[in-house]
Image (cartoon, rainbow, N blue to C red):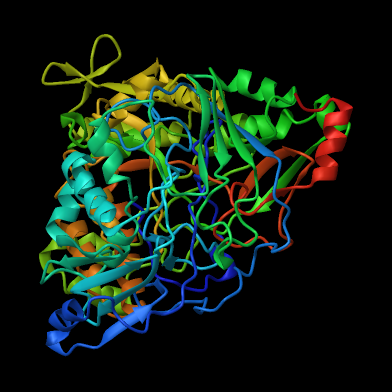
Amino acid sequence: MRTLPLTRTRPAAATAARALDAREGRLRRQVAGLLTLGALVTGLALANAARAQDASDDPVIKSHGYSYFGELKYPADYAHFDYVNPDAPKGGELAISAAGTFDSLNPYSVRGRAGALSSTMYESLLDGTAPADEYGAQYGLLAESLEYDADKTWVIFHLRPEATFSDGTPVTADDVVFSHNLFLEQGLPSYAAAVKKRVLTAEALDEHTVKFTFAPDISRRSLIDQVGSTPVFSKAWFEETGARLDEPRMETSPGSGPYMLDSYDVNRRIVYKRNPDYWGADLPVNIGRHNFDTIRVEYFADEAAEFEAFKAGEYSFRTEGNSRQWATGYDFPAVQKGWVKTEDLPDGTPPDNSGFVFNLGRDIFKDKRVREAIALAYNFEWSNESLQYGLFSQRSSYTQDTPLMAEGVPDGEEKTFLEELGDLVPAEMLTEEPVTAHTSDPARLNDRRNLRRAAGLLEEAGWTMGPDNIRQKDGKPLRIQFPINSSGSATLNSVVETYAQNLAQIGVDLQVQKVDPSQFTLRRRERDYDMIYAAYRSFLGTGTGLMQMYGSAEAAFSVFNPAGLASPLVDEIIEKSLRTDSLEAQDVSLRALDRALRYEFIMVPTWYNPSYWVAYYDMYEYPEELPPYDLGYMDFWWVNPDKEAALKSAGALR
C-alpha cells in the first residue's frame, strides 16, 4: 500500500528526479481508478450508530477527501482538477511495452509474475493517485464522503449508491469489509501484520456505510488513508469461484474501475478497454481523465526486441530508462520523418532510493566495514561517463534534493531531536556530517585510492587474501551472489559487470547471475540473494509505510525492505516521527531519519535523473502545464484523432 506524505508546496529545488532503475519497460504507474467528487453528507444514514460513536463528545470531521492535517486543495464543489484538459477528446489507443513474462492476472498474489496494469480494474474508497498537483491528499472514489473523530480513533465511509462492478452488481459495504479481511488473511505477510496491529474492526453499518475502528495508543498516521486505499473486490465473485487472493490465476474478478480486461495472450499481450457502462464516467472528477478507449501492453523477451518493436511502430509510447539508448538510439527513420517525438519532461517527484542493496541477513555483511569496502569499489563517475553518457547524478540521501535532506553537522531542532534519543544515537552522528557517497576518478574504472581504502577495511574486518586471490575469513571465501533480471537493461548489466571487475581486484568474488524474470521475482520475494539492485520508495512525509520499509518488526520478511534492516535507532526515529503534531516537527524527524539511514549503510547508492525521458508517436497530447507529481500519460494525456489518422495513413503504426 502506498505511503502518503502530507500535502506541501515543494520549492523548485525539490523537483528532485526519481532514480531510474535502468530497466526497460518500467511502467511508472498503473491506470488510476476514478476519483469521485461528492457533496458533504449532512446527515448519517444510521443515526443510532452515529450517536453511539459520538458519545465521547469529540468533534466529528466530515469531508469529501482526506489528508492528515486536514488541508485539501480542492473544495467539495470543484469542477475538475486544475491541470487536466476538460475538453480532451475520448478515443484512440495507448500502446506501451513490458519486458519479460507474466503468468498471472492477479496482481495481489504472493506467487507468480502478474501482468502489467492488472490492478487497474479495481478501485478503493479513497484514491491517492490523483490529483497529481497535491501531495498527500486523497479524495473520495467509491466513497462520496467520510467522517471521523478528531482523535482519529474511527472512520466512517459513505459509499456512492451508484457504484457498481463491471458485471453490473452494486459495490456494497459488505464488499469493503470482505476485501479488507481478505488482505489480512491472504495478502502479503508484511502488510497483514502491520494492519492487524492498527485496525481493530471493520464493519458494515448498512449497505452503503462502513466503519473502521483503530487501535488505541498508536500513531494516528496511515490509518484512515490505509483503510481508504484498500482495493475493493466483489465478495460474491470470490465466494462463487473459490478463488484466493494469494494464488496466481488468469481469471479476473469484476472491478469497478473505468477500465476492464479485454483480452490477453500469455507473455505476448494484454489489452484493457474502457468499460462502456462505467458507473462514474460522468462525475466531475473524471473530466479530462481516462481518455483512451484501449490500453495495450506488448510483451518482449528483452530490451533489444522491445526497442526494435517501438521503432517499427508495434507500440506507440515509451518511457526510456536506458541512458545509452536515450543518448544514441533515437535516430531511426520514424524520428527522422517526424513520426516519433522525443521529450525530456520535468519530474517533480523525489527519486526512489535505488542502489546495490546488501542482504543484512548474510553473515558477511554484519560488519559495516565490509559494506563500506564493497561500496568503495563502485566507481559512479566512470560508469556515468563511460556507460551512461554522463546523464545521471549520484544519490547520497534518502530524501535527495528536498528540504528533508540531512546536511552538515546536526544543529538546532534536529540536534535536540537526536539527543533526546539517548544512547541509541552513535556519538559520531552528532559530531559529523551525514554519510555521503564517495567520489571516484572518472578517467579510470579502478580508482586506486578507493581500492586501497577498501582493501584496508577488509583487512581490519579480518578478511585476508587467499591463494586464489579471493579473500577468506574462518575458511570461507568472500563470495557474493548478485542476481539480475535477464530481461532488464543492458546498461545495468554493464555497470554491475564492471563493478565486479573492481571488486575482484580487492579479493571479492561478485557472482553476477542472470536469471529469467519469474525466477528473479521469486528470489527477490524470498530474499534469495547476497546483493541486489533494488529501490526503497521515496518519502516526503511520515506514514506507517516507513515501518514496512525500514522497521524491525517485519524486517525478516517484508518485500518492501530488501536489505532486511532492523535498527533500534531507525525504529525509534520513525516512532517519534509518527507522533509529531506539526509539519515543522515532522520535517525535523525526517531529516534525522535520513541521517540515520545513511549511517546504517544498507546499500551502495547509485544514480538518479531529474527528468522523464519519453518517446511517442506524434498523436498524443498533454496539458500545457504538467503537474509536479506525475507524468500522467496513462491518466490525463489524450489522442489527437487527426494526427492518429495521418500516422496510420503514412504507415507509421502497425
Residue at left offset 21%, top offset 57%: 570
Residue at left offset 24%, top offset 88%: 59
Horizontal side, residue 194 vs residue 641: left or right? left
Count of numbered circles on the image? 0
Q: Position of residue 326 (x, y in %)?
A: 68, 34
Horizontal side, residue 71 vs residue 361: left or right? right
Asked if 122 appears above or below 134 in the picture, the reply is above
Specify whether residue 404 is in view. Answer: yes
Q: Quadrant of residue 626?
A: bottom right
Q: Nearer the viewer, residue 293 or 551?
A: 293
Horizontal side, residue 206 vs residue 474: left or right? right
Q: Quadrant of residue 166?
A: top left
Q: Indicate the quadrant containing the C terminus: top left, top right, bottom left or bottom right.
A: top right
Q: Nearer the viewer, residue 342 or 144?
A: 144
Residue that sits furthest to the front in the current view:
168
Asked if 363 appears above or below 611 in the picture, the reply is above
Q: Position of residue 324 (x, y in %)?
A: 65, 30
Horizontal side, residue 619 vs residue 308: left or right? right
Q: Position of residue 230 (x, y in %)?
A: 32, 53
Residue at left offset 57%, top offset 38%: 273
Q: Nearer the viewer, residue 136 or 538?
A: 136
Residue that sits furthest to the top in the current view:
468
Asked if 473 appears above or below 452 in the picture, the reply is above
Q: Position of residue 488 (x, y in %)?
A: 50, 25
Q: Quadrant of residue 370?
A: top left
Q: Nearer the viewer, residue 361 or 503?
A: 361
Specify whether residue 442 is in view. Answer: no
